[in-house]
Every structure is written in C-alpha cells, then in structure tokens.
Image (spheres, helix red, strand yellow):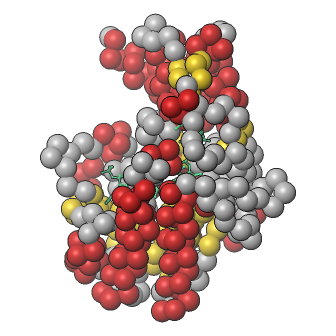
Amino acid sequence: MAKKALITGILGQDGSYLSKSLLEKGYKVYGLMRRYSNPTFDNLDYLSVTKKIEFIEGDMSDESSLLHVIKATQPDEVYNLAAQSFVGGSWQQAKVTTEVNALGVLYLLNAIKLFSPTSRFYQASTSEMFGLASDGDYQDENTNFHPRSPYGISKVYAYWMTVNFRESYGLFTANGILFNHESPIRGIQFVTRKITDAVAKIKLGLSDKLYLGNLDARRDWGFAGDYVESMYLMLQQPQGDDYVVGTGENHSVKDFVIEAFKVAGVADWEKHVVIDARFKRPAEVPNLKARPAKAMKKLGWKTKTTFKELVKMMVDADLKRYQSKKA
Ligand code: NAP
Ligand code: GDD
C-alpha cells in the first residue's frame, strides 16, 4: 500500500517541491491549506501536480482543525512546512508569527500523540535560530541559538517542542535546520526573488530601480528542489534526529545582485540599486553559513546546484515570465 504523507504549507515554495517529489516516489499526498475566498494554486500549477493531491482545509492556529486532519488522514509521515515565514514581517506580526510557528507546532505534535503516534514528524526549523551565534565561521548542530527576530524566536520554541516530544513520548520527530533555499517560485518578498524579478523587469525596460536594505548580509543560499530531498531522507532514518542542511558556502546580498545583473546582461548595477531604509531590519542576522557534515554523512545528502546556477535559474525564469506576458 502507498505510504501516506501530510504536508502543511503545501501551497508554499517547499510544499510545492516536496509534494512533487513524494508523488514521484509513489506517496499518497494530503495537503493542509488555509481557507481562501479566492484560492490560488500558482505554485502547484507551476509544478503540474495539483490534481493528485488531496487538499484539506485547516489552520495552524486552530487546534481543532489539526486534531481533525491527523485523525482523518492517519499519515505515515507529517511534514510541517506551514509558517509565517517572512522574517522581515515578524516584528509587525509577532503574535500571529508566534501562534502559527510556535503554538501551531505544539498543537500538531499533540494531535499526532493522541491520534497517530506512529507518524513520523518533520519540523521546518531554520538557520534563523542561530542569529548572531556561530562557531567561528559557520553554524552546525552544536552551535547555540541566538535568534534576532520574533520569527527566529518562534522557531526556537518549535525546535525544542519537537525535541521534547521525542524525548518525553518517544515520537519519531526530526528537525531540519535548513539554511536559505530559493527557486523560481520563491515568494516575491524574499530578497533573492525580489532581485531576480526586478532585474528581469529592468532588462525588459519595464522598470528602472531596485529598492533594497542591507547589502552586506551574508546567506548560505541553495536550491529548494535539492533541500526537500533532505526532509524526506530525515524521515527514512532508524531514529528521529536533528540536522543542519546548507551548501557550506555563503555570499552577500550584494554578490547576489551583481550576479543577477550579470546573468541578465545589464551593465552598471549601481545605477539601478537604491538603498531604502524601509527594507532594513530592527536587528539583523549578519552571517549564516552551514556546516552540513552530519547531513552529508548520515543522510547521504548533498547540494547539487551551485550559487551561479541558482541565480541563473531564477533570472531566466523571471525573464521568461515577463517575455511571455509581453508577447
Ligand atoms: P512559504 O513559501 O512562505 O510557505 C509557507 C506556507 O505556510 C504557505 O503555503 C502558507 O499558506 C502556509 N501557512 C502560513 N500560515 C498558515 C496557517 N496559519 N495555517 C496553515 N498554513 C499556513 O515558505 P517556504 O519557503 O516554503 O518554507 C517552508 C517552511 O520552511 C517554513 O516553515 C519556513 O519557515 C521554513 N524554512 C524556510 C527556509 C527557506 O529558505 N525557504 C529556510 C528554513 C526554514 P498560504 O499559502 O495560505 O500563505
Ligand atoms: N526580504 C528582503 N528585502 N531582504 C533584504 C532586502 C530586501 O529588500 N534588502 C536586504 N535584505 C537582506 C535581509 O536583511 C536579510 O539579511 C537577507 O537579505 C535575506 O533576507 P530574506 O530573503 O528575507 O530571507 P531571511 O534570511 O530573512 O529568511 C529566509 O531564510 C530563513 C533561513 O535562514 C526565510 O525563508 C525564512 O523563512 C528562513 O527561515
């Protein structure tokens, strides 16, 4: 019989790539989605998998809906990807961020404990939990947390709750501490997609300026399609555990900007980029770089896409999108 997976946050970037990958592996996929007055399946349409997924309405901040979905689906694996995932918005929406990203995980773990204790649980943890902390130049499973945003703090709570349900009740739970991962279907507010979208518009004469905040922040950027494989691998291990996943290389926002303009063949990037204080954060995370040795050794996972390939993939996709709109 096909294995059953429940994915929360199915309509997001990672939910789209993960659902495609699990369907290809022969899984029956259930997707938790919020109720919309006007639903959009853009990401899933992009990956052409919509028809094979069974959608269930629910909300991470509504415990009763999570009890219902776990009881009704009895999944072998639960991938909790749902979150208010935009760090920059988490200061203005700290309560919602906490309810969804922190309490929502408690509700989901409780539902599993009550109605489906053999389900294996993946929690979408994040390098934002490290914040200011590093061990020298990098972060790994032994690095302390020093989150810098309501988002990072909410994810630290969820991380420890995930560990606690493993230690207290023997549930199979895993934290994937993923560093930034991007793709052509990355949300437009995140800096990489904001850059590639603007560069495509500038190239095609549809715009002239790109407004950004801190160009010096450094991130370890990988491709989302590679990273969702690590989530799957974590749930196939003999025991639940916690893993850092990243490329082991980092670049500044400025490096990303320069590469994107170069790929598009637009000269003089400095003429187009405007520093705008609105996009600076009250507390910044200056430098994230993974040391993914444990994931490489225990999961056999490795990133496949280079920084330059990622930038090109995203710029090309945005150019294609605007060109087809113009045609
Ligand atoms: P994303 O594109 O923002 O997707 C998040 C999904 O969560 C969206 O589909 C959203 O639904 C859903 N959601 C938000 N609030 C919800 C609620 N109250 N109830 C139910 N669903 C809700 O994020 P992503 O980039 O795919 O990231 C997936 C997960 O990994 C997130 O938990 C994120 O924090 C974490 N993470 C991401 C990265 C990264 O670099 N991408 C790195 C580390 C960790 P709507 O479609 O209705 O908005
Ligand atoms: N979004 C945005 N917009 N970021 C900007 C801008 C801008 O105009 N200008 C500079 N930045 C800087 C931010 O200050 C940050 O240092 C960096 O670009 C990356 O910002 P985001 O792309 O918004 O991502 P993030 O690193 O804050 O968070 C993402 O990665 C986390 C993993 O480390 C999100 O996907 C989180 O959900 C994820 O947990």
Residue 176: image quadrant is: bottom right
Residue 192 seen in the figure: no
Q: Nearer the viewer, residue 262 or 154?
A: 154
Residue 94 seen in the figure: yes
Location of residue 232 with respect to 274 vertically, above or below? below
Identify the residue at horizontal 47%, vertical 50% (top origin): 91
Identify the residue at horizontal 61%, vertical 60% (top origin): 147
Q: Nearer the viewer, residue 66 or 76?
A: 66
Whole-percent x, y for residue 29 in the image: 32, 64
Asked if residue 116 lies left or right of residue 137, the reply is left
Q: Nearer the viewer, residue 276 or 218?
A: 276
Asked if residue 98 lies left or right of residue 305, the reply is left
Residue 243: image quadrant is: bottom right
Residue 70: image quadrant is: bottom left
Q: Which residue appears farthest toward the bottom when viewing the image? A: 169
Whole-percent x, y for residue 280 in the image: 57, 36
Q: Quadrant of the N terminus?
A: bottom left
Asked if residue 82 lies left or right of residue 209, the reply is left
Image quarter for ligand 1? bottom left
Identify the residue at horizontal 63%, vertical 33% (top origin): 214
